[in-house]
Amino acid sequence: MNTQAMNKNMRRSMQRMFPVFVLPVFICFTFSFVVPFIQALYLSFCDFFIPKDATWVGLSNYRVALLDISFWHSFLITFAFAVVSILAINIPAYFIAYFLKDKFKSVSLFRTSFFIPNLIGGVVLGYIWSMLFDGVLSFFGTYLTSNAVFGFFGIVILVAWQQIGYMMIIYIAAFNAVPEDMLEAAEIDGATAVQKLFRVITPNMLPSITVCTFLTLTNSFKMFDQNLALTGGNPINTLENGMQLKTTELLALNIYSTYQINRNWHGTAQAKAVIFTLLVGGLALSQTLLTREKKEKKIPKPDDEKKAAQQ
């Protein structure tokens, strides 16, 4: 009884102190995200050079942004890049983590080796890989930004090399959290290693797969410094109407490039940034809901298992 009373008092104390712990985080979130986003939303309806001289122009910035061919071209390139990156990063990271989840000699060295690229800055990586790609392609009489395909997959290779180790750490933690009794039951039933991986382990890994997929998706859409340093959006394709499109320019770099044209484009760039935020949020929410739905279908509930056993 004394233990129960102590636990009850402890819970009450934690509930009373809850606002104290939440308040600092709430203040930081408000001033680092909510307030800047509201200001950015307001500026997207204005023509400005600096925020103080903003002049209200209504929806004209959004009209210009939505009619900008380069914006939609960058969005399609970014979407394709996100899809390819999700596969190129998460599939290798998953299987590398599977082989490095057990403790053996030099396992820490292997884990560290895969994780180190994540610690290097994006601009530095961009210039390093640019020299590597150009050095290899020079043997074939070409270079990275001579071809849009080379540039696109160059960014994919760079980002995969950088982020596989980070996702691997998350997957290793998830592998080690799989219940041992489930693995033992699978062995007793005669399941092979492949069957255990895909029918026992993988369903339990779905929350981590969701996290890694979400991280890869958002990182792909936020990709800026690697894109700027590696290709700068090049090569440039000139359309029939004389308009120039940067064929490897991702969405974040397109917004930056629009802002850099001149002061008359600052409002348009801000409108693109707001659209960009809404698109990323919508994609992330859709992906999370779809993955959660699949997880609920694959993992049976305890009540369903009891009914099946009774039958």
Image (cartoon, helix red, strand yellow):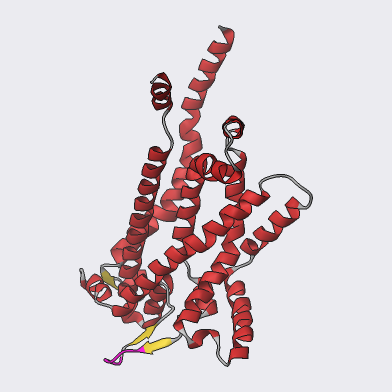
**Quarter holding the C terminus?**
top left
Q: Quadrant of the N terminus?
A: top right
Residue 252 location, x and y as percent?
42, 70
Percent from the top left, x then y, of residue 11?
A: 50, 22
Whole-percent x and y of residue 76? 35, 71
* 172 lies above or below 219: above
For residue 162, which quarter of the picture? Answer: bottom right
Q: Which residues are magenta?
A: 238-242
Q: Residue at x 64, y 85 (%)?
A: 135
Chief SS of the magenta region: loop
User: Residue drawn 29% across and 67% down?
Assistant: 44
Is residue 289 at all visible to an observer of this figure? yes
Q: Is 32 included in the stretch rendered in magenta?
A: no
Rendered residue at 62%/47% (across/down): 172
Closer to the camera, 227 or 48?
Answer: 227
Residue at the farthest right position: 105
